[in-house]
Image (spheres, grey):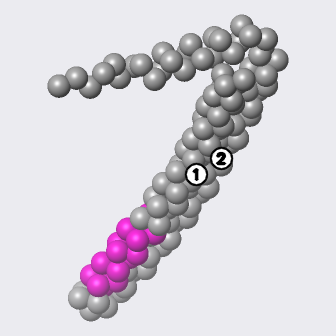
Amino acid sequence: MSYGDPLSPFFETLRNMNEFWFRGGANQMGEIYRRNIDAIEKTNRAIVTGMIEASQRQAQVMQKTMADLGQAAQGMAGGANQGAGAEMMRQAIISAVERMTDVNRNMAEGNAEALEMLRGRLIENMGLLTAKKDE
């Protein structure tokens, strides 16, 4: 059973780009590259902004977790019921895990948005190259 050459689409795209370039499309190709750089810049900016926000949120989660655990430890040291203190610690840990899950979900959504921006640019590039080839 033959599956064909898996690199064939890649090389066909390169041939199309070369044909486009040498048929007087240099100005349009330059515009395509400029748009690509703009898309990469926007994507990187979105990723970095998301990472900064996630880092800040993670720091807030840690501060809140430490405060909750500190309160539970003080309650236990103050002679409170150990069962109640253990429950407070358990709740603090569960809360921290839930907050970190939320942070991770937000990071994943941000990364998906960034990849979608790049995918859209790639599709636009392919449409431009195909349109020029058909002319």
Main SS of residues in magenta: helix
Q: Which residue is mark 2?
A: 46
Give residue 117's quadrant in the image: top right
x, y percent for residue 10: 47, 21
Residue at the far top: name it.
22
Q: Position of residue 3 (x, y in %)?
A: 26, 25
Q: Residue at x 63, y 28 (%)?
A: 130
Is 123 positioned to the left or the right of 32 in the image?
A: left
| Magenta extent | 85-100
At label 1, which amino acid type do we have?
A: Glu
* Residue behind mark 1: 113
Circles 2 and 1: CB atoms closer than 8 Å: yes
Q: Nearer the viewer, residue 97 or 12?
A: 12
Q: Is residue 114 above or below residue 96?
A: above
Q: Is residue 27 above or below residue 122?
A: above
Magenta-drawn stretch contains 97 = yes
